[in-house]
Amino acid sequence: MSRYIVPLLFGLIGAAILVSLGTWQVRRLEWKQDILAQIEARIHGDPRPLPAPDAADPERDKYQPVALSGEIAEGEIHVLVSVKQVGAGYRIIAPYVTTDGRRLLLDRGFVLADSKAAQRQVGPTEVLGNLHWPDDRSSSTPENDMTANIWFARDIADMAQSLNTEPMLVIARSVSPMPEGVTPLPVATAGIPNDHLQYAITWFSLAVIWLLMTGAFVWRMRQTKEGARP
């Protein structure tokens, strides 16, 4: 019996470690779901006034709902994106001038690739949306093609310089009047990674496999011993 103690301990300790990792991922899942619920509540909350130009905080003010009155000015930036079940196209970023004279970046929404050069309605527009400081750029993101006006990330500082606005982006949830051919792409939690459930399942599955392998190893040891008896 003593010859089985080491493999059994090895199997049980390994399985316990894997189960603890799975349990930790379950706790992380609960934490992440709570965070996502808070973000959803914030996104769909009551509109609040814009923060002052010198007081905006990307962490504190991220997703803040705003209701704006003013007009869309001339000029556009086209950010290449792909929308599920629709295909490739562009986010249309335009300057928006509020009634009190502030000039902001407005993410109007999505147009199909073949509508990139189409004329779009400008002028007086009411906007309901959310402040956002997106982090689109990674080490593999190409540099923006300024000549062709094809951007690969919503680089707030560069967009603000290009369109002569404050470095503050409002992503439209709804606009009135609704421009033809432009579909708002409002902020949502769908793009925030939440893989903790898959990780938990993986760790628990590995624990089961570990125990099965341990059981198989002990069984083979026993069979070998019995086969070796005279």
Image (tube, rainbow, N blue to C red):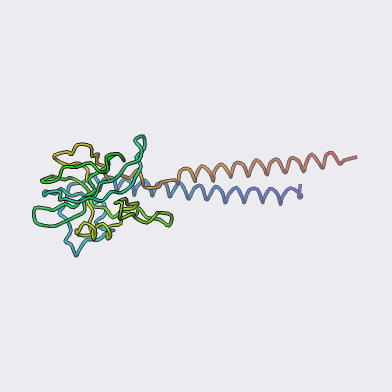
Instruction: Find the residue positioned furthest to the front.
Output: 147
Query: Quadrant of residue 185 in the image?
Result: top left
190 left or right, relative to 197: left
- Give coordinates of residue 220: x percent, y percent: 76, 41
| Residue for point 20% across, 49% down | 65
Quadrant of the image containing the C terminus:
top right
- Give coordinates of residue 107: x percent, y percent: 24, 48
Instruction: Find the residue positioned furthest to the bottom.
Output: 54
Instruction: Find the residue positioned furthest to the top.
Output: 85
Camera-side residue: 48 or 213?
A: 48
19 left or right, relative to 83: right
| Residue for point 32% across, 52% down | 151
Instruction: Find the residue positioned furthest to the right.
Output: 230
| Residue for point 60% across, 47% down | 15
Callout count? 0
- Give coordinates of residue 119: x percent, y percent: 19, 42
- Give coordinates of residue 7: x percent, y percent: 70, 49
Camera-side residue: 127 or 38?
A: 127
Camera-side residue: 206 or 27?
A: 206
Tell me if residue 229 comes above or below residue 54 in the rendering: above
